[in-house]
Image (spheres, rainbow, N blue to C red):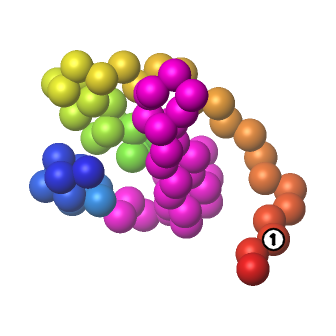
Amino acid sequence: MRRLEQAGAGSPPGRSYHFAWVGKDGAIEVFDVWDSRESFERFGETLVPIMNELGADPGEPTIVEIHNMVLG
């Protein structure tokens, strides 16, 4: 997160929500909601090199279209 902040991508345009948790295997898992695939891909141009420098494997994202969202 610090590296993203330093790169000016801590709160990237187009990202509505960000969730991160430790999965059953101990790895960090992330779920984000974006306004478009293009916004997500632009963010990836900053995120992936940072993750690679830190030795973290970003893996392949699963991209799905949200049809309904209930808050509260």
Whether residue 37 appears in magenta in the rendering, the answer is yes
Is residue 15 rendered magenta in the image?
Answer: yes
Determine the residue positioned at 51% across, 22% down: 25
Mark 1 residue element:
loop
Identified at 22% across, 34% down, the residue is: 50
Q: Is residue 49 visible?
A: no
**So how many labels did they put on this image?**
1
Of residue 41 and residue 28, the one placed in the foreground of this image is 28
Task: Return the residue found at the far right.
Answer: 67
- The picture places residue 24, in percent across and down from the top left corner, at 57, 28
The quadrant the C terminus occupies is: bottom right
The image shows residue 57, relative to residue 29, as above or below, that is: above
> Residue lying farthest bottom?
72
Q: Measured from the top left, where is residue 56 in percent x and y?
A: 30, 23
**27, 3: nearer the viewer:** 27
Mark 1 Cα-neighbour bin, 10 Å: few <14, some 14–19, many ≥20: few
Q: Residue at x 57, y 46 (%)?
A: 31
Name above or below for residue 14 compared with residue 55: below
Report the residue marked by disc 1.
70
Residue 1 % position (x, y) = 26, 51
| Residue located 18% across and 52% down the image | 2
Residue extending furthest toward the left: 6
What type is the residue that disc 1 sits on? Val
Which residue occupies the foreground of this view, 54 or 40?
Answer: 54
Q: Position of residue 12 (x, y in %)?
A: 38, 60
Query: Compared with residue 72, is residue 64 higher up or lower down, i.e. above or below?
Result: above
**Segment tinted magenta in the rendering:** 11-39
Residue 27 position by quadrant: top left
Please indicate, yes or no, whether residue 58 appears anywhere in the rendered image. yes
Instruction: Judge left or right: residue 13 versus residue 19.
Output: left
Relative side of 63 to 70, left or right: left
